[in-house]
Amino acid sequence: MANLRVAVDVGGTFTDICVLDEASGSVSVAKVPSTPDPIDGVLLGVAEAGVDLRDVVLFSHGTTVATNALITRNLPDAAMVTTRGFRDIIEIRRGTKDDLWDAYKDVAPPYIRRRDRLEVNERIGYSGEILETLDEDDARRVSRILARRGVSAVAVCFINSYANPVHEQRMKEILQEELPDVAVSTSSEVLPEIFEHERFSTTVANAVLSPLVTGYTQRLSDRLAESGYRGDLLLLHSGGGVMTPRAVEQLAVRLAASGIAAGAIAARHLATLCGFDNAIGLDMGGTSTDISLVYGGELRVTKEWFVEYGYPIMFPSVEVLTIGAGGGSLAWIDEVGALRNGPQSAGADPGPACYGRGNEQPTNTDANLVLGRLGEDLIGGAMSLDREAAERAVASAIAEPLGLGLDEAAQATIKVANANMADAVRLISIRRGYDPREFALAVFGGAGALHGSALARDLAIPTVLVPPNPGITSALGCLLVDVRHDLSTMFLAEADTVDPAEVEGEFAKLEDEARERLAQEGVSPDQMSIQRFLDMRYLGQWRSMSVRAESPLDIPAAAARFHDEHEREHNYRRDDAPVEIYRVTVHAVGVTPKPELARYERSGARPEPISLRSVHFEEEDARVETPIYTRSDIPAGAVLEGPAVIEQLDSTVLIPPGVEAEIDDWLNIRMTISGEA
């Protein structure tokens, strides 16, 4: 009887596999190197985990295929068809730069070059009236040009099509007649919203990804089926839900942030399991750190994000702030003699100096090894670290130029890395109106548990949470999500004068479409959940904020929530100013059964350390003889007083002096940071 749930998270270096046995609630993990064709790595990981796909009831997958394609621009040939006079919208953009003060740094070019952006005669007015009928002869001429060029995808982006999609729909029909094997994306289907650059940009990203991602998901589905899996492949999308390959065919761009969303979802689950409604997730890997925020049990979501600056993707996405701080981040001294850390990274190859693969520059991993926080054996003895190589790298690059002792230089390296991460946490919390002191810090990734306690002290966060398998936690996040679609439509009206029946009518249209999409993906009516939101703004503002809307609709109550949220995030409110409804949004959720993780009986027994090691802590002037524990030896209910180091297959947990760590019923480590912070 099929009773296994499998989640696979494909990263640039490793592919992580998490397997849940529904019968026992036990979780097993595996980790294998990623492969040039990610599908090979997925199946290799499944085999490494000892999984027979005939026993799998659910297969969930987080992938970086779409993200990497946009970053590397390894994209299929694509074209754009637009209203005459508007071919350069996606190149003009908003006229802004990522670095305001660097006059010589140009924004990356559009995903579709200018020669492949073709124009046709048509025009829709701002209110939806037809000002100029689509010239079908012109449309067929353009289609034949694209057929000769052999494009794989076309983005149809007409001005004001959000108000009336009739011309885009007809253009799509003509393209499908002339180019039957080409994927066509229309802006009125992908993102029916007012701002043309954002709408065009999102549609173009969807078009260029569609052949690539659709082909990938279909090949993976076929290979899973050949191996015995009988269910739907579920793919994690940027909004924190999953979608089937059928939905990916229409909205491939939703997978452009698939990988980083998994860690944020896992952070929310860990915090909720431990009884915290507010949590900051910190996923520190080898190259970067991803930071997310959970408030009131909900992940913070953004509606505007990008893979490359200047080309926004306007689908709701779990807000994750990524910085170049990881175990492989390089420590270096800048032109004025200041110690810096990252964003450059040694990567997986050659890796930190202690890997012995030719790199001689110090990294955070080297600094932790020098300080004794890392042992010389990792991954259960499968990898040995060269302490002398780490010491040479830290000494030559940091200690000698700055006139510091070896431990001082290594500690300074870690402090700079921690300061960078603490600043990023402040950006996603304090800058948004959240007080970190009211949050727990959930740390995971291969390196997160080494730095979590120090970050909590810097930010005055009272509790640090470490899951049982920190290095595989993102894969676990793929098991904890629902099928989800986000639908929206423009609706401009003042909240004080709008007819609520009109707003209800727009909600009804979106809800009908949402239920239809969920039904197509096999979600039964009793598993459907529809959440309604109004995007609102003060009259005259450009940007809006999303607030929950009840059913039946209570617009004054929604406006009151808008005032409260505006004050929390921007530190001011204008109760006497008119509020405008900008957009109507529906989140359609197909609820999937959540796994019940095994709960362990508390024994309270404190295990014996496997060894002692001399470790340097920031809190102490000299090294301290520190007990070293193996994670699997520590039972639920055990309490450890720092200093201590806990080693396991995929991570190392550092417990500084004065910090108490308790193992809870689910084998999470809960560290309590002293009130002095």
Image: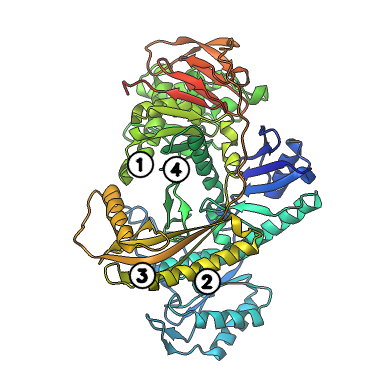
The image position of residue 365, as x and y in percent, is 51, 27
Q: Residues within 10 Å of mark 1 (few under 14, many from 20)?
A: many
Compare residues 220 and 144 and report the one nearer the observer: 220
User: Circle 1 is placed at which residue position?
Assistant: 429
Q: Residues within 10 Å of mark 3 (few under 14, many from 20)?
A: some
The image position of residue 179, as x and y in percent, is 66, 78
The quarter of the rendered structure image containing the C terminus is top left
Res. 297 mark:
4
Marks 4 and 2 sit apart, C-alpha to C-alpha, by 31 Å
Question: Which mark is first along the chain, 1 or 2?
Answer: 2
Judge depth for marks 4 and 1 and give the one in front.
4
Question: Which mark is first along the chain, 3 or 1?
Answer: 1
Marks 4 and 1 sit apart, C-alpha to C-alpha, by 15 Å
Q: Residue at x 41, y 43 (%)?
A: 296
Judge depth for marks 2 and 3 and give the one in front.
3
Which amino acid type is shown beneath numbered disc 4? Gly
User: Circle 3 is placed at which residue position?
Assistant: 500
Which amino acid type is shown beneath numbered disc 1? Ser
The quarter of the rendered structure image containing the N terminus is top right
User: Circle 2 is placed at which residue position?
Assistant: 189
Question: Which mark is first along the chain, 1 or 4?
Answer: 4
Q: Residue at x 38, y 72 (%)?
A: 501
Which amino acid type is shown beneath numbered disc 2? Glu
